[in-house]
Image: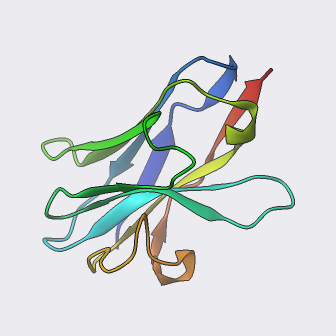
Amino acid sequence: QVQLVESGGGSVQAGGSLRLSCAASRRYNNYCMGWFRQAPGKEREGVAGINSDGNTMYADSVKGRFTISQDNAKNTLYLQMNTLKPEDTAMYYCAARGVSCYPFSPLPPSGSFRYWGQGTQVTVSS
C-alpha cells in the first residue's frame, strides 16, 4: 500500500505561482507518478508525469509553465506551477502506480493508477 498526502493548493491571481507537494509513504523501484486535475463538469486529465527513470512528460496546455520534480530522499513529488491561468483552476490529484508510465504521455489513463491523494484545490482568478 502507498499513501499519498498532498499539500500546497490555494488561490492566486492570474500570472501567479503555486507549488504542490505530494508525500508518498513508500515508492516502488519501477513506478509512474504524476498529477491529474479535474475542473467542475470536466473529465480528469493528466497534467504532468514522471517515470522512475526520471523522464518527465507534460500536457501541451502546461508545457513551459509547470515543472514536475521529485525528492527521492523525502519520497516527495512536486508540481511547480508558474504563470497560472484561470483555466488552470481545478482540483489537483497526485497519483502513483507500480508500473512505468510508458508508452503514455503525459500520463497513462487515470483508471490505471492504484494510489491517489485526497486532492488539493487550485483556484486562479483573472
Residue 96 is situated, as x and y percent measured from the top left of the image, at 38, 67
Q: Is residue 67 visible?
A: yes
Q: Nearer the viewer, residue 84 or 116?
A: 84
Q: Is residue 38 left or right of residue 27?
A: right
* Residue shown at the point (67%, 65%) measured from the top left: 44
* Residue shown at the point (23%, 49%) measured from the top left: 75
Q: Is residue 3 visible?
A: no
Q: Nearer the viewer, residue 9 or 52?
A: 52
Q: Single out the residue that lies furthest toward the right.
A: 41
Residue 91 position (above or below residue 36): above
Q: Nearer the viewer, residue 13 or 95?
A: 13
* Residue shown at the point (47%, 33%) measured from the top left: 65
* Residue shown at the point (32%, 54%) measured from the top left: 24
Corner quadrant of residue 76 = top left
Pick the quarter of the image with the C terminus.
top right
Pick the quarter of the image with the N terminus.
bottom left
How many labels were placed on the picture?
Answer: 0
Q: Is residue 44 left or right of residue 3?
A: right
Q: Is residue 81 left or right of residue 67?
A: right
Corner quadrant of residue 70 = top left
Residue 62 position (above or below residue 107): above
Residue 93 position (above or below residue 82): below
Q: How is the image coloured?
A: rainbow
Residue 66 is situated, as x and y percent measured from the top left of the image, at 45, 37
Q: Nearer the viewer, residue 90 or 114?
A: 90
